[in-house]
Image (cartoon, helix red, strand yellow):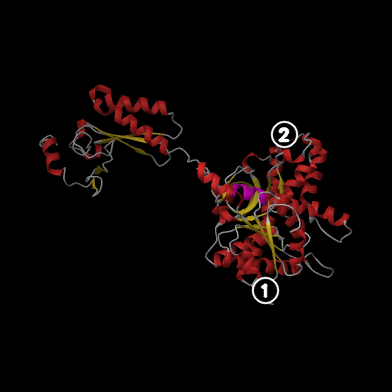
């Protein structure tokens, strides 16, 4: 370069060189990919390949910053012409700024680049910060008013059963519900007639399978709750029960996919650990699967946890306590995280195991109390209503509670990290709800105690089997 003027090189190469990027829009703006250009502006001042003294900055592979500069004394030896200094990801910004400023101005090297070089470091460091999930936007002003006034059609599929009837009653009494459509294979017109005498705003209709009843019930639905299914009968194996209930859920979700593909789907039908994956596979096959709109209702586990720890929480109203319950919705796949409860709990060590077991197997307690003649239908209806009410609030753009629910993690913001940590795609964690459904899955597992983490490991083993069983039911249907 000592034999050729830098200005001459620039005049020859300014319109065409390997680093030049031209755009047709924005007045034909030009950029530079030159690693020794600290600004990316295509100009004589910043072009590193032209100047004997130049500085470049870029992100290093390990998340730090690399400073690249020319050795003016080695212009004839390309191998020794470049020197690189790398600052690790844990080096403070202040130290990097100081080093870069010094390298620019020391001994009159390129003091004119000091300011832009430090600005470049600042931009690189900002880009390396973990990106925070953007909260779901909430409607404001006229949009919020319109959302609040919008009519929401609520559907209960399985409305005549032990859970369906009290759930329908709670929904009919709710001021948030504008229209209630009930569907079941028997008795729905009678249930609808009975509920229609209640003096609450919700308009009500009941449908049976005949005369396209499912289509009529689902068309235009915003939220669909599915408590449908049969209880275990004498002589029935658990596998027999699974096949019947899985088939019921599969049929109903096919109807949702066809007649109300944009609806929020809340599945209560057991086993939730398998029926939610079944629903997901059906919706995928129909090309309408939106993970943010499919929920397994695990709220009963939360309700039980809140109730059973009342003597330790000191809350007069048990629902004022916040207790994350994660995992699944059966037996030891249910994991109450008492260590993260608010207010904090002081559970005696000799009471802990029994308390966890009671939350996990609370359904057995009810079946025994009913002498085997029934299960936890009323408390499940209450829990189903509580979650459904939160979903409606979110739809209307008003504040709703963050509630644990069994979701497809890879399709929910924040869920990927939880799926990676647990090794399963479906898992119940606290979820923030928004107008478009699940806005964010909250990873509470990192804060769990060592004892609770061991419970999660056990839960994951059971969940993997349950999830595979649900997926296999759709992909390899059992013989009829």
Closer to the chain start, of discs 1 and 2, is: 2
Residue depicted at 82% across the width and 45% down the height: 354
Frontmost residue, 123 versus 158: 158
Q: CA distance from mark 1 to mark 2?
A: 48 Å
Frontmost residue, 292 versus 475: 292
Q: Quadrant of the C terminus?
A: bottom right
Kindly give the residue lying farthest to the bottom in the view shown.
Answer: 480
Question: Seen in the image, is 325 located left or right of residue 351?
Answer: left
Q: Quadrant of the N terminus?
A: top left
Residue depicted at 23% across the width and 23% down the height: 108
Residue under numbered circle 1: 478
Question: Seen in the image, is 384 located left or right of residue 410?
Answer: right
Frontmost residue, 61 versus 76: 61
Residue under numbered circle 2: 344
**Segment colored magenta:** 388-395
Q: Position of residue 295 (x, y in %)?
A: 63, 55
Vertical placement of 186 versus 377: above or below? Answer: below
Label 1 SS? loop
Occupied quadrant, residue 345: top right
Residue depicted at 76% across the width and 57% down the height: 197
The reply to whether residue 163 is visible in this rendering is: no
Residue 253 colored in magenta in the image:
no
Q: Position of residue 117 (x, y in %)?
A: 31, 31
What crowding class fits label 1: few (fewer than 14 Cα within 10 Å), some (14-19), or many (20 or more)?
few
Kindly give the residue lying farthest to the top in the view shown.
Answer: 107
- Main SS class of the magenta portion in the image: helix
């Amino acid at each position: 370069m000592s034999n050729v003027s830098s200005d001459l090189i620039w005049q020859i190469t300014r319109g065409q060189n390997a680093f030049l990027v031209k755009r047709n829009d924005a007045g034909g703006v030009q950029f530079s990919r030159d690693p020794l250009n600290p600004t990316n502006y295509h100009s004589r001042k910043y072009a590193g390949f032209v100047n004997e003294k130049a500085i470049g900055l870029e992100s290093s592979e390990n998340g730090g910053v690399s400073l690249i500069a020319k050795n003016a004394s080695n212009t004839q030896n390309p191998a020794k012409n470049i020197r690189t200094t790398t600052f690790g990801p844990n080096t403070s910004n202040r130290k990097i700024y100081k080093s870069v400023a010094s390298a620019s101005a020391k001994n009159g090297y390129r003091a004119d680049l000091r300011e832009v070089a430090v600005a470049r470091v600042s931009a690189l460091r900002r880009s390396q910060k973990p990106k925070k999930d953007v909260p779901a936007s909430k409607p404001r002003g006229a949009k919020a008013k319109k959302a609040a006034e919008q009519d929401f059609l609520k559907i209960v599929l399985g409305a005549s059963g032990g859970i369906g009837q009290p759930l329908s009653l709670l929904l009919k009494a709710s001021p948030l519900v504008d229209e209630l459509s009930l569907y079941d294979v028997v008795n729905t017109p009678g249930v609808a007639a009975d509920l229609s005498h209640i003096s609450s705003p919700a308009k009500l209709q009941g449908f049976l399978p005949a005369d396209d009843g499912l289509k009529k019930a689902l068309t235009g639905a915003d939220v669909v709750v599915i408590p449908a299914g049969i209880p275990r009968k004498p002589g029935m194996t658990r596998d027999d029960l699974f096949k019947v209930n899985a088939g019921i859920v599969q049929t109903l979700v096919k109807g949702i996919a066809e007649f109300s593909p944009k609806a929020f789907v809340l599945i209560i039908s057991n086993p939730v650990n398998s029926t939610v994956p079944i629903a997901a596979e059906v919706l995928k096959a129909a090309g309408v699967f939106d993970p943010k709109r499919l929920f397994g209702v695990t709220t009963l586990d939360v309700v039980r946890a809140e109730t059973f720890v009342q003597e330790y929480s000191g809350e007069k109203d048990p629902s004022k306590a916040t207790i994350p319950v994660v995992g699944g919705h059966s037996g030891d796949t249910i994991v109450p995280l008492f260590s993260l409860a608010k207010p904090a709990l002081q559970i005696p060590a000799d009471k802990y195991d029994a308390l966890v077991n009671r939350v996990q197997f609370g359904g057995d307690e009810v079946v025994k109390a009913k002498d085997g003649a029934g299960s936890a239908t009323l408390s499940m209806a209450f829990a189903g209503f509580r979650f459904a009410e939160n979903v409606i609030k979110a739809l209307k753009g008003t504040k709703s509670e963050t509630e644990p629910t069994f979701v497809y993690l890879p399709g929910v913001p924040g869920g990927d990290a939880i799926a990676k940590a647990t090794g399963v795609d479906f898992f119940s964690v606290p979820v923030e709800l928004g107008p478009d459904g699940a806005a964010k899955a909250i990873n509470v597992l990192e804060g769990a105690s060592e004892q609770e983490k061991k419970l999660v490991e056990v839960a994951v083993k059971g969940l993997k089997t349950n999830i595979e069983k649900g997926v296999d039911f759709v992909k390899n249907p059992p013989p009829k």
